[in-house]
Image (cartoon, rainbow, N blue to C red):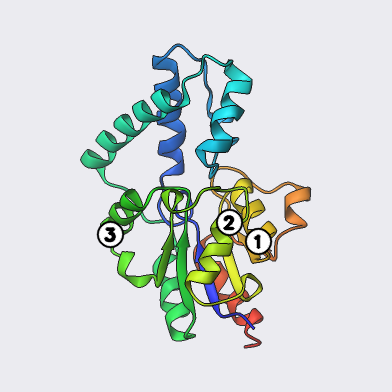
Amino acid sequence: MLKAVLFDMDGLMVDTEKLLSRFWVEAARSFGFPMTPEHVLGIRSLSWKFAAPHLQSIFGEEFDYRAVRAKRLELMNAYIAENGIEMKAGLTELLDHIGRRGLKCAVCTATDHERTRRYLTSIGVYHRFDAFVCGDMISVGKPAPDTYIEGAKAVGCEPAECMALEDSPNGIESAYRAGCIPVMVPDLSQPDDELRAKLRAVCSDLSKAIPVIDELLGIS
């Protein structure tokens, strides 16, 4: 029986993946590395332990992940401070439905807790979650299963009792390996056939996860 819904954040609840792509590219190029948006797709939801060697395998050992990431944060924070961030379609409707069904919900994100709090507070939904598992709260991040295993524990459930909502392949891999019920709401890329085999459903926006929840609860 479904008991909880676990949410990724970037690209799922807040429309920040396009900003991450833009500012990763700008930051890397400011250091002389020819990064493209396609390179950024490969590190979506990856913890630094996986993202750093991945990018060094492309650009060489001289790629200073921490320095480039710090520049990316500087650029992105300045943009958000001036322009704000947008909520993804269907989030309010989905959270309302989760509440009506009496389900728990938690955030399971690669982003640190301070930025998670800031982003979700800015769109008015931070208080609606029962728990948070953020990138700075675990030792091994996505695509390892730890984030979702801890998310399930945080709401008092087994992973198999939790739907995991994700927009990226790395996030889906994490949820799948944890034993959750993976549902993808694609943002910058669609799932390929290999990824689709791991999914309970693919939804065009968050509100489309509502019938999937009811199906899992046995409600017609």
Report whether 107 appears left or right of 42.
left
Q: Position of residue 101 (x, y in %)?
A: 49, 85
Compared to residue 200, the image places residue 214 above or below, namely below
Q: Which residue is mark 1?
A: 178
Q: Which residue is mark 2?
A: 146
Q: Position of residue 188 (x, y in %)?
A: 55, 43
- Label 1 vs 3, first from the N-terminus: 3
User: Which kind of residue does numbered mark 3 sit on?
Assistant: Thr
Q: Secondary structure at mark 2?
A: helix
* Nearer the camera: disc 3 or disc 2: 2
Q: Which residue is mark 3?
A: 121
Q: Position of residue 28 (x, y in %)?
A: 44, 20
Report whether 154 appears left or right of 166.
left
* Nearer the camera: disc 1 or disc 3: 1
User: Which kind of residue does numbered mark 2 sit on?
Assistant: Asp
Q: CA distance from mark 1 to mark 2?
A: 7 Å
User: Which kind of residue does numbered mark 1 sit on?
Assistant: Ala
Residues marked 1 and 2 touching at CB (< 8 Å): yes
Q: Secondary structure at mark 1?
A: helix
Q: CA distance from mark 1 to mark 3?
A: 28 Å
- Label 3 vs 2, first from the N-terminus: 3
Q: Please rate how many residues cluster around mark 1, counting C-alpha atoms within 10 Å: few if below 14, some from 14 to 19, many from 20.
A: many
The C terminus sits in image quarter: bottom right
Report whether 31 appears left or right of 127.
right
Q: Please rate how many residues cluster around mark 2, counting C-alpha atoms within 10 Å: few if below 14, some from 14 to 19, many from 20.
A: many
Q: Residue furthest bottom?
A: 219
Q: Secondary structure at mark 3?
A: helix
